[in-house]
Structure formats: C-alpha cells, structure tokens
Image (cartoon, rainbow, N blue to C red):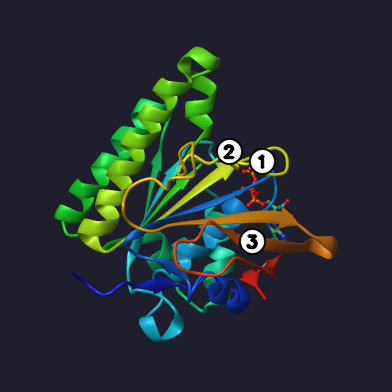
Amino acid sequence: RKDIGRITTGSKALDELIGGGIETQAITEVFGEYGSGKSQLAHELVVTVQLPEDRGGLNGEAVFIDTENTFRPERVEQIANAFELNIEEVMEKIYIARAFNSSHQILMAEKVNELIQEGKDIRLVIVDSLTSHFRAEYVGRESLATRQQKLNQHLHTLQNIANTYNAAIFVTNQVQARPDAFFGSPTKAIGGHVLGHAATYRIWLKKGLAGKRIARLVDSPHLPEGECVFKITNDGIVD
Ligand code: ATP
C-alpha cells in the first residue's frame, strides 16, 4: 500500500484543520451554500496538485468533472501566476470533462481509469458539483432510494480510483440552509454510517465577515472537529 499523499489548499490553517491538506486514497466532500467557496477550492487544488512535494503538491495532474459549467481557465491562470507556474503547462495537466447529466457524470468518472492507463499521472479528481444532476433528475420521495443508489455507485467508482492510483477525490455539494442531522450529505448515509471503508472527510464552508470564509471539519474518522478561517483572493485561497 502506497503512502498517503496530501495536497495543500493554499491556506495553512485549512491544511492543518484537515491534517496537512487534502488526502489521497480518500474522498473529501466540501459542502455549503451558494458562493461559500466550494468551486474556488476546486480551482486552487487543480493547481496545487501540480506543485512539487516540498511546496505542498504531488507533481501530479488533475481531472475536473464539471457539471454546472463552473470551470474558469482565467481563475486557474490567476492562481497559477500566484505560484509562479507557467499557465500553458498548468492547463495541459488539467483534464476537463463536462458532464451533461448524471449518467454522463458516472461515465466520466469511470473514464478516469482509461486516462491513467494511457499514462496520465492523475492524482486529483474533482467533481463540481457531485449532487446537482442527481438532485435535478431524481425528484420526489419515491426516487430518493434510486438517487442514493446511483450516487453510491458513483462514489464507489471514485473511491476505487482513489485507492488504485493513490489519488485524492474532491467533491462539492451545495446545501441551502444550516446543516441538519444528516447535513444533506451524499457521502454519509442515513444512520451516520460513512460510505465505504476508506476515509471520507467532510468540510462545511460558511461565509464570514469581510470576505472571509469559515471551514468546519465534521464527521472526521480520526481528526478532531474544529474550525478555521481563510480568505479567497485574486491569488486564490490564503490564510
Ligand atoms: P455554488 O454552490 O453556487 O457553486 P460555490 O461554493 O462553489 O457556490 P464559489 O464559486 O466557489 O462558490 O465562490 C464564489 C465566491 O468566491 C464569490 O462570490 C466571491 O466571493 C469569491 N471569489 C471568487 N473569485 C474571487 C477573487 N478573485 N477574489 C476574491 N474573491 C473571489
């Protein structure tokens, strides 16, 4: 079994909260309201995964499964500049897959295996948003079970990629209000059981004052619950 790798979020405080950065061989779910910074974190990570290990990266490439047309190359460029990386080289190492519906999204995740077998060194898979297509397509109480079953299948595919290729999985999940008992979480099934056997990290993002963001780690398998503050700037995520 390979050593677990970690990818910096750009914020030391947030890295420390989650044990040193986003982990490989695990799924990290970030959830929060509209505008809380979920996609911003995703844009940061597709850059930082490319950094050498001594700068908090994994020298790796990234897949960005984009379900809501949120991927912005201009934003990647700003973040790459902040790390003094060459934007063309950075963009070449990000594989963008637009997913038009939930079946397509599931298929795109399965295709990551092929990309890696072709020789791409994928160490990070983003799904932004994990849940939007599923919510739009499976509406009403009677379809809830099917929705969760499809989502479980998708998460299982992602977890396999994480384990097989020592990759980090980062998924976003928009939730409207304050989290309730189940936090509206797709990675945590009813009854509090965390999906699968490997670690699942869940980070709740909230908007704070003066452009600040508050991150709270919840339901972590082996880290204490806690909070930290970070900022979103032109340079990306910072303390
Ligand atoms: P949704 O659920 O709607 O997709 P989200 O949580 O993914 O929301 P993001 O798109 O990550 O939200 O965050 C958008 C917010 O990030 C903006 O409202 C703004 O506050 C902040 N932001 C984006 N770019 C910058 C920037 N260059 N400088 C400072 N703040 C920025």
Q: The residue tagged with tag 3: helix, strand or loop?
A: strand
Q: Which residue is the site of mark 2?
A: 184
Q: Quadrant of the N terminus?
A: bottom left
Residue 120 seen in the current view: no
Mark 3 residue type: Arg
Q: Does mark 3's beta carbon lie closer than 8 Å to ligand 1?
A: no
Q: Residue at x 53, y 26 (%)?
A: 135
**Residue 152: x percent and y percent?**
36, 36
- The one nearer the camera, 161 or 52, is 161
- The one nearer the camera, 107 or 233, is 107
Residue depth check, mark 2 versus mark 1: number of the one nearer the observer: 1
Q: The residue tagged with tag 2: helix, strand or loop?
A: loop
Q: CA distance from mark 2 to mark 3?
A: 15 Å
Q: Which residue is the site of mark 1?
A: 180
**Residue 36: x percent and y percent?**
69, 51
Q: Residue 216, labelled with which disc? A: 3
Mark 2 residue type: Gly
